[in-house]
Image: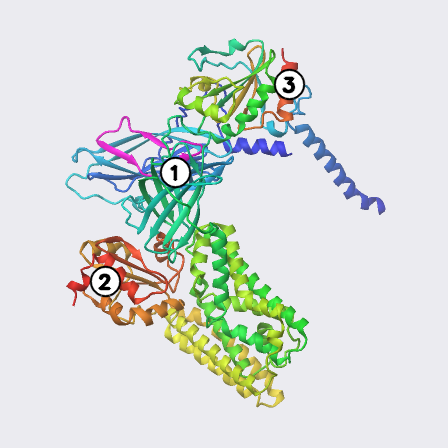
Amino acid sequence: MGSLFGTLRRHLRRGLAFAGPGAIGLGAVIGVLLSAPAAAQTAASPWVDYDQGRARLVSATENAAGELVLGLQYQIAPGWEIYWRSPGEAGFPTTIVWDGSDNIADAALQWPRPDRFEIFELETYGYKNDVVLPIAARQLRSADPVAIRAEVNFLTCEEICVPHTLNMSLDLPAAGSGRPIISAHAPLINQYRSLVPSRDGGLGLTVERAEVVNTDDGQLLQIVARSQTPFGAPDVYVEGGEACVFSKPNFRLTDDGKRAVLQTRISRTVLARKDAPPLLGGELTLTLVDGTRAVEQTLATTLGQAEPGSFLPFVAMLALAVLGGLILNVMPCVLPVLSIKLLGVVSHGGGATGPVRRSFIASAAGIVFAFMVLAGVLIALRASGAAIGWGIQFQQPLFIVVMTVIVTLFAANMWGLFEIRLPAWIAGGAGRVAPEPHGTRSSFASGVFATVLATPCSAPFLGTAVGFALARGPVEILAIFLALGLGMSVPFLLVAAVPRLATKLPRPGRWMVVVKNILGLVLIGTAVWLLSILAFQVSPMGAYFLAALMALTVAVLFVRRRLPVGLRPFAAGAVVLLAVLSFAIPQVGSAVTRAAENDDEIWQLFDPDAIPQLVADGKIVFVDVTAEWCITCLVNKRLVLTRGTARDLLHDPNVVAMRADWTNPDERIGQYLASFGRFGIPFNVVYGPVAPNGLTLPELLQESVVVETFLQASGRNLLASGS
Amino acid sequence: MAIKKLVWPAAGILAAAVAVVLFVGLKPGSENSGGPRIEGQVQNFSVANRQTEATAWRDGQGGKVSLADFSGKVVMVNFWATWCAPCVRELPSINRLQAELAGDDFTVVAINIDTGGEAVAAPFAKRLEIANLALYLDPRGTTSRSMGVNVMPTTVVFDRAGNEVGRLEGGAEWDSPEAVALLRWFIDNKS
C-alpha cells in the first residue's frame, strides 16, 4: 500500500515530468505559453504554468513612462522552493535573459529577504508559496512602446529538483507626454519591494562589526548590530565567504534590546571553491533581518573576541515570557482574581492544606490551559493570514459586554449581595458559603477567567515575548504562551507548594468584609473601563444603556435579599433577563454610527500613503497607533503625549500628528504594524526629513525619548525653528 | 435466524479477502512475478524495456565517452549537479555502491550536469569524497536531454546490451539492501 500510494503521489506531484525519452529536456524545459484566458490581462503577461506552479511578468504601470517597475510573480505549489540570489548549500537563483526585448535597458532583479529552508540537511535560502521578484528597468526611448521578452531560468526543489525555462512576454504602450497609469499589480509589487533589504540603512538598523572569533572548537562569525528600536529576533544571511556556509545564528540582545550580537559557526562544506577568498579580512555582504525590516551591508571582517554571555535566544525569550506572565498578576485587570482566590481560602478558615493545594494547582492548570487555547487561536488566525496581536478579542463588542456582565455580578458577589452559582463557578469557592470549597473544577475555571481578564493588559516583557513568538512559528507561539501561562501561575503554584502562605492569613472577620468591599469596587472600576471601550466601539448610548442595565442588576440583587422568599425567584429571573438584554447591545448599538471624534483637534486620521509627501514637504509626522482597549496606550496619552514638551511638539505647526485607531479590526493598520515587525500596540513612529522610513518608539513612552526621536527625525533644527 | 445473523459478517470477511487479493495483486513488484522486487529505497523505480538513445558525454580530460564503452556491463547512469540537494545527499551512497558492486558485470556512471563543468564539479566531488566515481561531465545537458531526463536526480539503468531497463526519479540510498538486490537482479537476469 505504502509503495503504491508513494508512487501515485510522486507521479501526481510531478505531473508530466516523465514524458519519455526525447521529450522536453533538462535545461530547456520550455514552458508552454497558454493562450490568454478569457479576461484580458493588462500590465501582465499570461500565466506560464510549470509542473510545480506558475509564473508571469507584471508591471506596476499600464504604460511605460521612463522608469519601469516590474515583477516576476511566482505562485509555487506547496512544499516547493525557489532560491534567493545566494541559494545556500544547494540550488541556484532565478536568472532572466532579455533577448528579443525592445526599448528596455538596465533590467535588474531585486531580491526580497529570503527565508531559511533545510532540504536534506542542507541549509538553503529561498522562497515558498507566493513571491514576487521585483525588477527595476528603464525605458530607452520615451516615445516608443516597450516590448519585454523574458527567458526565465530557475530551479525548484522539494524532494527532487526540477530546473525550468519559461518564456514570457509583456508589452507596454508608451505614455508619451501622458502620465504613468498605475496598474492593479502595483500594490503587490510594492509589497515585495518593501521586503528587499535596504542598502542605505534607513530602517534604523546598522551592522557595526563582523568579526572572526577563534574558539576552542572552531571559528565563529560574530556580528554586532544596532537598532534604534529594540530588536525582536534578528537573523543574518552571509554572502561572500565562499569557503564557508553559515547556519542560522544565535543572538543575544543588550542595551534594552537595541544592540544585538549574533554568532554562527563557520563551517567549510562541499561547496567550497578552490579560489575562495580568505574569510578574515575578506569582504562579506550581510543581510540583517529583524521582523520585516532588512538591511544589506558590505564590510570587511576583523579578528574579534567572543562577546561574553550565553547565546540562548529562545530560552531567554521563554524566561522573558515567564517574567511577563508573572507581572500580569499585579496588573489591575487580574489582581482581583488572585486576591479573591486568597480570600476564598481565608473564608474557609484555612487549616487543611490538601484541598488548598489542589485548588491552586487547578487554577494554575486553568491559566495554562487558557494560554494554550489562546496560542491555538493565534496560530489559526496567523495561518489564515489575519493581522493578529495581543488583546484582539477586545475588538469584539459582544466579548466586552459579556465581560462587563460577569465582572458586575462578580462585584455584587463581593459585596455579599448574592452567593449562588455564578461566582462560585468563577471564583473558585470565593463565595461565602460555596457549596464545595476549593472545588477543582471551579478553581480551574477561575484560572481560565483570570487569563481572559489578563488579555487586555500588556505587561513589561510580554510584548517582546509575544512579538518574538508571532514572528516565528507555531512551535514558538505554543512555547512562549506556555511560558506566559506558567509565569502567570507562579503565585498560584507558590501557594500550592507552601499552602501556609494562604492558610496562615488572619482568621476571617471584619477585615475580610472590608477587603471584599474594596475588591468589589476595583471590579466595578474594571467594568467602567470595559464600558468606556464599548462606548468607543459601539456608541456612547450603548455603553450608557449597559451601565443602566448593570446598575439595575445590582439594585435587583440588593432588593432581592429583602424580598419574601417566595418572590426571590422572580428577582433571579429579572437578573437573567437583564443579562440577556445586555447581550443585544452590540447588535443594536452598531447601527448607531459612532462619530469619529478625537479628543484633541491636532490629531488627523491615519493615512500612511500621505506620509511620504508630508515628509517631502519638510513636515515631521508622528503616528500613534492606539486602541481603547490598550491600557498602555492610555498611559502614554495621559503621561506623555498630552503633557509638557511632547505636547508642545505635537502642536508645532511643522508637525503632523496622525492617530490610527485599532479598537476595531482594521486590515490596513494591521499591515502597517506588520511592516515594522510589530504585532501589538502601543506603537508610535516619527517620520522626518532625516528618517523618511520612520523611527519607531518603545512601547512605553518617555518624554525624553520622544523628544530625542523628534530631534533625530528632524535633523535637529525643529526646536530652533519652532516657537 | 442464527444463519441470517451470520450473513453480514460473512460478506464482510469475503469483501476483505477480495480486497487483500486485489491489493496484493496490484502491488508493484509482485505484478510481474518474474521481475525484480521494487521496494523500500527504490520503491519509485519504474521498470521499462526500451531503446534509449544516449548521446556521448565527456570525461574529466575532455574525452568522449558513451554507453558503448561499457558494453557487456549493466550500467547505472546517475545524473547529478552541485545545486541539487537530493543529488548531493545520495552521491555518497552511490560511491559506496560502486565500491561494492563494480566489476566486469556492473558499473556506475555518475554524470555531472553543472554548466560550470569540471571547474565546478571536480573540487565539489573531491570534498564530497566520492573517489570511487569517475568524473563525467555533461555541462550542456545534451546527454541528459537525449535520455529524457528533466528531474534531478534521475538514475537510469541499462542492461548489458544497452537497453534501458528502468529508471528512478528522485533520490535513494543506493547501497541499501533493496537497491543492491534490484541491481543484482538486472545483473543476474538480463543478458
Q: Secondary structure at mark 2?
A: strand
Residue placed under numbered mark 2 in the picture: A656
Residue A146 shows in this picture: yes
| Mark 3 and mark 2 on one chain | no
Asked if residue B47 shows in the view, the reply is no
Say whether mark 2 and mark 1 are on the same chain. Answer: yes
Residue B96's place in the image compared with B55, above or below, is below
Magenta segment includes A420: no
Please give the residue where the numbered disc 3 appears in the rendered image: B184
User: How far across and how far down the image is residue A532, in percent?
Assistant: 39, 73
Q: CA distance from mark 3 to mark 1?
A: 44 Å
Q: Amino acid at mark 3?
A: Arg
**Type of the residue with mark 1:** Tyr
Magenta part of the chain: A87-112
| Pick the front one: A14 or B3 | A14
Work out how far the residue at label 1 is from the one at label 2, CA to CA, in angstroms: 39 Å
Which three-letter amino acid code belongs to the residue tagged 2?
A: Val
In this rendering, position of residue A156 left or right of residue A723: right
Residue bearing the label numbered 1 = A74
Give the SS element for disc 1. strand
